[in-house]
Image (cartoon, rainbow, N blue to C red):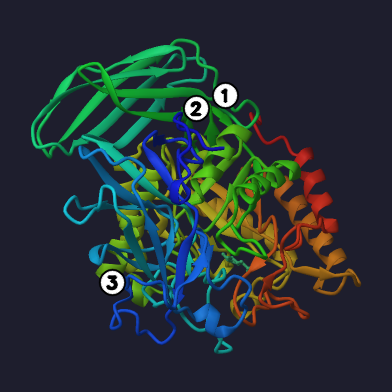
Amino acid sequence: MLAGGAPAQAADGITRGTTYSDAPDSRYLLGGDWLFRLDAEGVGLDQKFQRQETTDGWVPTAVPRAWNAGDNSVTSFQGTVGWYRKDFKLPDARSRMNWLVRFESVNYRSRVWLNGKLLGRNTGAYLPFEQRLPRDGLKLRGTNRLVVRVDNRRLPTDFPPSGLTGAGDPAGGWWNYGGILREVYLQRIDRIDVTSVVVRPDLPCSTCAASVGIRIVVRNYADRALRIGIAGRYGRQRARFAARSVPAHGFASFSSQVRVAKPKLWSPATPTLYAARFRVTLRGRKLVSYRIDSGIRSIKVVDGRLLLNGQKVALRGVGVHEDDPTTGFAITPARRAQIVAQAKEVGATVIRAHYPLHPDIHDLADRAGLLIWSEIPVYAVKTQYLKREEVRKLAAKELRQNIAANQNHPSVMLWSIGNELSARPGPVQALYIARAARDAKALDPTRPVGLAVAGYPSAGCRPQYASLDVIGVNEYFGWYPGPNGQISDRDALPEYLDSVRACYPKKAIFISEFGAEANRDGPLEEKGTYPYQRDFVNHHMGVFATRPWLSGVVYWALQEFRVRPNWDGGNPRPNSPIHAKGLLSFDGAKKPAWFDAQRLFAATPQLAVP
Ligand code: GCB
C-alpha cells in the first residue's frame, strides 16, 4: 500500500511513502528492527537509556507495538514506562535536507531524543506529532540513535483519565495499551516543508456548482528567502497559485479556488473522490508533492435534522475500537481494512470511536462510503478535573489537532468534543462546550459539533448544550439500571427519547450508543446470552424506527474489545476484561445478533429519507 512514487529503500527497514493519503511524498516509514526496554522500576532516566550506545538490556521489537498486548493484569492496565530505540541511517545524505520525525500515535506521555539530545515531549495518543531533527546533532552518513521514552501511567487529568470504579478497580473505557501504537515516519525536507494543506469543498446546494477552497502553508528551512511556485490540480481541473517568496525560516500561505461545475457528490451510496495533487517547485524543479483524496458533499444541521447534500439522513452504524487480540491497539493494515469491511458488511453508513482513528481508516472510510463520528478522548472526565485550566487546554489542543489532521476527509461527519461528561452539566461543562464549539467552528465552519451524553431521564433539558449542533445519546435502557434504577425498564425508552427531542428540537439527535453483552447461549430472559442480545437489538431498533426524527443510530459495538480488569458491562457472567456487547466476538465470529443488526440496518432507509 505504500505510495510515494520513488523506489523503496530497504536500509534499516526505512521505506519511502505513507500508507495513507493527505501526506507529502517525502515521508519515509521508520520500520524494520527497533529495540525495546521495559522500565517498570523507573531507572531509565537516571541510567541514561537515552544515551546508551550498546544494546545491552534492549530487546528487538517492531514498531508499532503495544508492550502489554495480551497482559490482562491490573498492573498492565495501570501502565508503566517503556523505551523504544531505533538506530538508523538517513535514507538521503544530501546536506541541504532537513528532517523531522513524525509519530502517528504514542500512548501516552513521551520524550524523544536523537543521539542523546532531547528533542521534545508530547502528551496524548491518537494524534500525530512531529519533532525536528536538529542539524547539528544529526549524522548525515553515520548511524543515528532515536530514543523514545513512553509513560502510559494514567492520571486523572489524562484523556482518557484514570480513576476507580465503585468496586475499587481501575476505571476506563478501553485497555490502556502502552507504547508506540501507530507508525513512525521520517520526513525529508528539501528546503520547503508543507506544514498544512486544507482542501475545503463548499457545496451551496446539491445541484449547485461546488467551489473548493485550497490553502497550503509552507515553511522555509533555508537561510535565504525562496520564491516558490505551486502547481495543483483538483480532479481534472487545475488549481492555480500565485508564486510567492517565502522568507528565510518563515512561513507563507498559498490559496486557490477551484470551481467544479457539476460535481459528483460524495455520499455513502456514491463515495466519489477527487484527487487533489500539489507540486511545490523552486525554479521549475520539484521540491515536494502532496496528495489528498477529497470528496464534495455538504453536512449541516437544519431544523433538528442532519442533512447530507441537503437531504435528511437516518444513519445506522456501529462503534469501533482499534483493538486486536494479539496486537492490542497496534493494529496492522490488514486489521484496519477488516474493521472497515466488517462495518460495511453489517450495513453501516457511520462508525464511531472514542478517539481519532488511524489515518488509514479515514482513507478506507472515504473510499468505502462510511461517515465517521470523530471524537477526541475526553472520556468521562470528572468535573473536578475539567474545571482545571490545564485539562481544558489539553482538550482544546486535541480538538484542534484532530481537525488539523482529519478535516480533509469527506468521511468525517462531525467533531465530537467528548463522551459522557457529567450528565447534569453545570458551569464548568458549559464553559468547556461553549469554547470547544466556538474553536471547532472557527477552524472548520463546514462541520457540526457534537457530544455524546449518558442517556438518563433525570438529566432533564440542559441549557449548557446550547452551542452543540448534535447530541449523541448513549442509551442502555433495559440493560443497566442507571442512577436510582431510572433506566432499568426498557419500556421507559420511548417516552425518554421523546423528551430528549422536546428538549432539543433544533439539534440533530443521534443514538450514539446502545448495546447488550452476549458471550454465551442461554435463555432469552437472561442477560448476557445471545438470545437476550438479539431481543435487545430488535426491540431498541424497533423503537428507533418509530422515531423518524433520529438522524442516526450507532450500535455499541461492532466487535468485542478489551476494557479493563474486572469489567462486567452489566453481564452476570462476564468474561473480563472483554467488552461483550460486540456483534462480533473478539476473534471475529458473528454472534446471532449480527444478523439482526444487518437485517434491520438494511431495512432502514438511511439516506435521502423523506
Ligand atoms: C458507555 C461508554 C462506552 C462503554 C459502554 C458500556 O457509555 O461510552 O465506552 O463501552 O458504555 O458498554 O458500558
**Numbered disc in front, either 3 or 2:** 3
Q: Which residue is mark 1?
A: 272
Residue 552 position within the rendered picture, expressed as x and y whole percent measured from the top left = 62, 45
- Tell me whether the residue at label 3 lies in contact with that at label 2, contact meaning CB atoms closer than 8 angstroms: no
Residue located 62% across and 54% down the image? 319
Between marks 3 and 2, how big is the CA–CA gap?
Answer: 47 Å
Residues 517 and 16: in front is: 16
Q: Earlier in the sequence, mark 2 or mark 1?
A: 1
Q: Quadrant of residue 324?
A: bottom right
- Tell me whether the residue at label 2 lies in contact with that at label 1, contact meaning CB atoms closer than 8 angstroms: yes
Kind of residue at badge 3:
Arg
Question: Tag 1's secondary structure?
Answer: loop
Between marks 2 and 1, how big is the CA–CA gap?
Answer: 6 Å
Q: Earlier in the sequence, mark 3 or mark 2?
A: 3
Residue 49 position within the rendered picture, expressed as x and y whole percent measured from the top left = 33, 75
Q: Quadrant of residue 365?
A: top right
Q: Judge whether residue 546 can be spotted in this image.
A: no
Kind of residue at badge 2:
Gly
Q: Identify the mark at residue 51; answer none if there is no mark.
A: 3
